Image (spheres, rainbow, N blue to C red):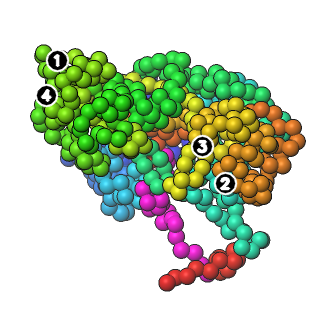
Amino acid sequence: MNEYRTHNCNEISLEDVGKEVRIAGFVQTIRDFGGLVFLDIRDMYGITQVVTSGDPNDVDFASHIPIESSVTVFGTVRKRAEETVNPKIKTGLVEIAIKEIKILGKRTQNLPFEINSDQDIREDLRLKYRFLDLRNDRLKNNLLLRAKVIQFLRNQMIEQGFLEVQTPILTSSSPEGARDYLVPSRLHAGKFYALPQAPQQFKQLLMVSGIDKYFQIAPCFRDEDARADRAPGEFYQLDMEMAYSTQEDVFSVIEPVMYNTFKEFSNKKIASYPFPRISYKDAMLKYGTDKPDLRNPLYIIDLSDFFKKCTFKPFIDRTVRAIKVKGHLSKGFHEKMLKFATSIGMGGLGYLEVQDDLSFKGPIDKFIPDDLKQELLKLAELEKEDTIFFIADNETRATELAGQIREELGNRLNLIDTNTFEFCWIVDFPMFELDEHGNLAFSHNPFSMPQGGLDALENQNPLEILAYQYDIVCNGIELSSGAVRNHDINIMLKAFTMAGYTEEEVKSKFGALYNAFQYGAPPHSGVAPGVDRMLMLLSDSETIREVIAFPLNSKAQDLMMGAPSNVRRDQLRDIHISVDSK
């Protein structure tokens, strides 16, 4: 017999009645009825009720065990009395009559919070005592889900002929969009490793190496600010790359992987399969974002040309976007939307309501000439009782604000179907954009292949060049980013030159790729769905930290381990670092 347990706490059943068994776990609850004490023992798998004999010594000992102590219980399984049956748990028909109970790990400190409580607990407290927080059923179930999803993803990739390869954690720093985490070298004074923001260069080098289909559940490290769907520090991707492949080949591999995973681990409906494809340009115009929540039926239209014919000064020489809403809206609703609009930096929120006779009512009605009102009805496909909201600013800002207004309207009007997953591909991203200084910069992945190749780089307006880049979006969350890679050294150098890099800088910052692409690199492409974000959606968690065992907090601190922390001077001396404490 195992010293601590013969059964897990979910395994005791009517078939075991009369048998002697041993279980082990945490004491979840104690109910003292004077002559008898009932205890619920909880392990990772379930709960079993145990009960003392009437012996006063047994009663006294059991009633004074601190809640959440770790114990082992030996006893005889018996059927519960009918009035004590608990249908909510798997072992609710039976209990164990205690012959022996031992405390294996006694709780000697007050609990900072109640385990499995429905009360809101401060996140900083939960993270400081994460080892207790993980005893909570919800978080435990999230970790179980995480393990199953990762295994499912891994099996699907292996079944499709992909080879799992681990790539280095200590690598060189390269400009890939976020700040690197740097690791000083002891052996090479003044030099630093960087933790990889993604295995991007390594997986491309594997393609040059002749690895035909690569994948891994890859850790990625980025020094970024936290968001609800972004963990600071470390996150994981289902990273994959294929040689001799096109964008369509990537879609044909990863789309069923995503569909099968969400179908396997959720009861929610998947609205469209295959996933619809939306160009970046159309997404920004119609939804005001490149990660649209398609569960929201509202969409944005462009009325800039129409308002060039009107006299409303705030709309003159501005990009004007509009959103139509079906049904009558109250004055209070308009006031709340105006308050929201001002909170995101808008000067106001113009709107018009369509009356029964198809006339307009609203703050800007008098600024629209009568002969243009019928044109507006047709342009916006307005019907009686519809309301149309207007957003005006420069093109970039109007796009962003319209997207936020659309999202707020969808939430306030309860238009979002929370029982559905709406996937889509966003495709045809621009290759370049202007940075805050007006200089040409990569808009997405710098290693992407421009559509049209070298000819496009040499002969097209750089801001009109599209790239073979694509994202998977689900319910307004970007799940993955990918691209057909630029494997041609001449195209690579031209693209980087246009973005302000010299050939020497490309050699310095991307030396391995620069060298490898001169040795017969095959065409290749890939994508990297975020595992943590997938789990956040599958578990209906409000933040990504709920699906990570030991996450950093929103300030990139590990409150449990005390990281980041100070280190000894001799440790700093070994790595040739001095710290100015002023």
Between 127 and 375, the one lying in front of the other is 375
Mark 3, residue position: 432
The residue at which mark 4 appears reads as: 361
Q: What's the mark number on residue 358?
A: 1
Please tell me which of labels 3 and 4 falls first in the chain: 4
| Dot placed on the residue nearer the N-terminal end, 3 or 2 | 3
Which residue is more in the foreground, 64 or 157? 157
Which region shows up in magenta? Answer: 548-569
Verify whether residue 46 appears in magenta.
Answer: no
**Helix, strand or loop at disc 2?**
loop
Q: CA distance from mark 2 to mark 1?
A: 55 Å
Q: CA distance from mark 2 to mark 4?
A: 52 Å
Foreground mark, 3 or 1, reads 1
Q: Earlier in the sequence, mark 2 or mark 4?
A: 4
Counting from the top left corner in percent of width and height, residue 121 is at: 30, 52
Label 2 sits on residue: 500
